Image: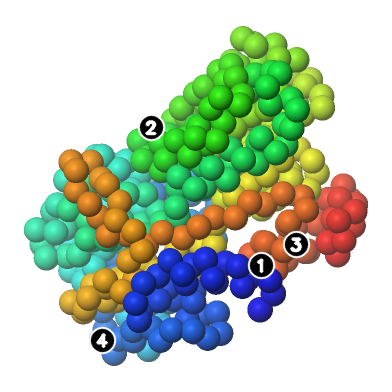
Amino acid sequence: MNAHRLRIAVAVCAAAVGATALAGCGSDSGGGAEEHRSRGAIKVGLLLPETETARYERFDRPLIEKKVDRMTFGKGKVVYANAEGDAARQDSQVDEMIAAKVDVLIVDPVNAKSVAGAVKRAKDAGIPVIAYDRLAEGPVDVYTSFDNEDVGKVQGQGLLDALGAKAGSGRIVMVNGAVTDPNAAAFKSGARSVLDGKVTVGKEYDTADWKPENAKAHMESAIAALGKEGIVGVYSANDGMAGGIISALKAAGVSPLPPVTGQDAELAGVQRILLGEQYMSVYKPYVAEASAAAELAVLLAEGQKFDGMINQMVGSAGGRRVPAVLVPGISVTRDTVQSTVVSDGIYTVDEICTTPRLKAACAEIGLE
């Protein structure tokens, strides 16, 4: 195990308390604590929110399916649906999962508030509910995600590092995520805890549905208001929006581009980082998050205890405290692409270095 992988394993394993560790710390990574194994033909419902963000279909879904299959010796089944960004569709999908008599439901909500009624219907039908990646409102049993406040802090610190002496002499633009996503508020809070008092925020926006085109429109508005010379940096809450923001900056003739943050270590984001168009992203070890959700699902489906996996209690709407498994994120810059997403097998060099410009950029940092 290389040094970077060891840092991730230590961080995640240290967060898990008791005998049942995160699956990423067990046999999925070549050794560690023993995981629960099921011999039952359980049925796990999996509802993901959208496909705008590449991670859901590329990582989350196949990782959860693989883990459930392995833990149940091939007898477990994952029933899957994606809401394509439509909260009403996801509400109906919950009802379909209830009708299909799933034993447990993993739901990553399109709208954390509006899904509460559907979560209650599932619970009333005797189906345990795991909130995945975003904390759904309603009587969820457990939540697994990344430490979202910490992700925001990593983003904020990345922007400060990139700005250096410019931090106190210009204005930044903050392009946050969707107000319907509680994670967006956590990212913003974490970033603000680092940035407040050290930078001046010239313009700030919340972005409907996390859509890149909406982020692009926000950036166009900010450039019109502040002037293309008046922006020293941009806080973007994720990589997809960073793409829209950078497109707007280029179209306005802003050169050199100011540092732009991101999140999710999407392939396009990593490529922009290598080209010097985006300063950083946050790599979130999806294997650990997805493995935790799958293991929790198997335990809940069988009525087993999951206390040993919990590393935090988080507050939800209505004042409930929800047991949670939270995983830390890691900064990705041009200097750390090799030691993060390449070393962990998220992307191959061939997948990243696809054009002459990218091949040249990869060669500059020894990524060959």
- The residue where tag 4 is placed is 40
* Residue that sits furthest to the front in the current view: 197
Dot 3 crowding, Cα within 10 Å, few <14, some 14–19, many 20+: many
Mark 4 vs mark 1: give the one in front.
1
Q: CA distance from mark 2 to mark 1?
A: 34 Å
* Residue found at x 32% / y 41%: 111
Q: Secondary structure at mark 4?
A: loop
Picture layout, residue 27 above or below residue 133: below
> Identity of the amino acid at label 4?
Gly
Q: Is residue 316 left or right of residue 233?
A: left
* Residue found at x 22% / y 52%: 321
Q: CA distance from mark 4 to mark 3?
A: 41 Å
For marks 4 and 2, the one nearer the N-term is 4
Q: Nearer the viewer, residue 92 or 365?
A: 365
- The residue where tag 1 is placed is 4
Q: Nearer the viewer, residue 107 or 329?
A: 329
- The residue where tag 3 is placed is 338
- The residue where tag 2 is placed is 179
Q: CA distance from mark 1 to mark 3?
A: 10 Å
> Identity of the amino acid at label 1?
His
Which image quarter: residue 198? Answer: top right
> Identity of the amino acid at label 3?
Gln
Q: Secondary structure at mark 1?
A: helix
Q: Nearer the viewer, residue 319 or 266?
A: 319
For marks 1 and 3, the one nearer the N-term is 1
- Indicate the quadrant containing the C terminus: top left, top right, bottom left or bottom right: bottom right
Q: Is residue 166 left or right of residue 217?
A: right
Mark 2 vs mark 3: give the one in front.
3
* Residue that sits furthest to the left in the current view: 124
* Residue found at x 63% / y 71%: 5
Which image quarter: residue 257? Answer: top right
